Image (tube, helix red, strand yellow):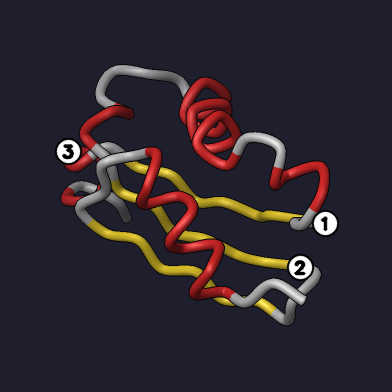
Amino acid sequence: MITPEQVKQYIAAGLTCELLEVNGDGHHFEATIVSPAFDGLPRVRQHQIVYQALGERMREEIHALSMKTYSPHEWIHRT
């Protein structure tokens, strides 16, 4: 069973993050990700970047991932 820490490591290995928090139960995970790679991108594209960082793990190891993604500017100005 995969741990939240492993998911965090997988994301961090493929994406520069200013903030990365992952919680979950081994099957379902929730992540908050702040990355400069998200600057100026719509939310769907931000999520696609995270999926790219996870690669095949999304199909093989991670059954569900709920994400909140932000650029640094969005993170500072979130409500």
Report which residue position mark 2 lands on.
28
Identify the mark at residue 5; answer none if there is no mark.
none
Report which residue position mark 3 lands on.
73
Report which residue position mark 1 lands on.
63
Identify the residue shown where x is 55% and y is 29%.
52
Give the position of the N terminus as an image quadrant: bottom right
Measured Cα–Cα span from mark 1 to mark 3 = 30 Å
Query: Mark 2, residues whose alpha carbon is within 10 Å: few (<14), some, or many (≥20)?
Result: some
Q: Does residue 70 appear left or right of residue 65 in this picture?
A: left
Q: Nearer the viewer, residue 48 or 41?
A: 48
Q: Earlier in the sequence, mark 2 or mark 3?
A: 2
Mark 3 lies on a secondary structure that is helix
Mark 1 lies on a secondary structure that is loop
The image shows residue 79, relative to residue 1, as above or below, that is: above
Mark 2 lies on a secondary structure that is strand
Q: Residue 31's x, y, as percent?
A: 52, 61
Instruction: Say whether marks 1 and 2 touch (CB < 8 Å).
Output: yes
Query: Mark 3, residues whose alpha carbon is within 10 Å: few (<14), some, or many (≥20)?
Result: some
Mark 2: amino acid: His
* Mark 2 or 3, closer to the camera: 2
Measured Cα–Cα span from mark 2 to mark 3 = 28 Å
Q: Does residue 74 appear left or right of residue 59 in this picture?
A: left
The image shows residue 69, relative to residue 79, as above or below, that is: above
Mark 1: amino acid: His
Identify the residue shown where x is 60% and y is 35%.
51
Q: Earlier in the sequence, mark 1 or mark 2?
A: 2
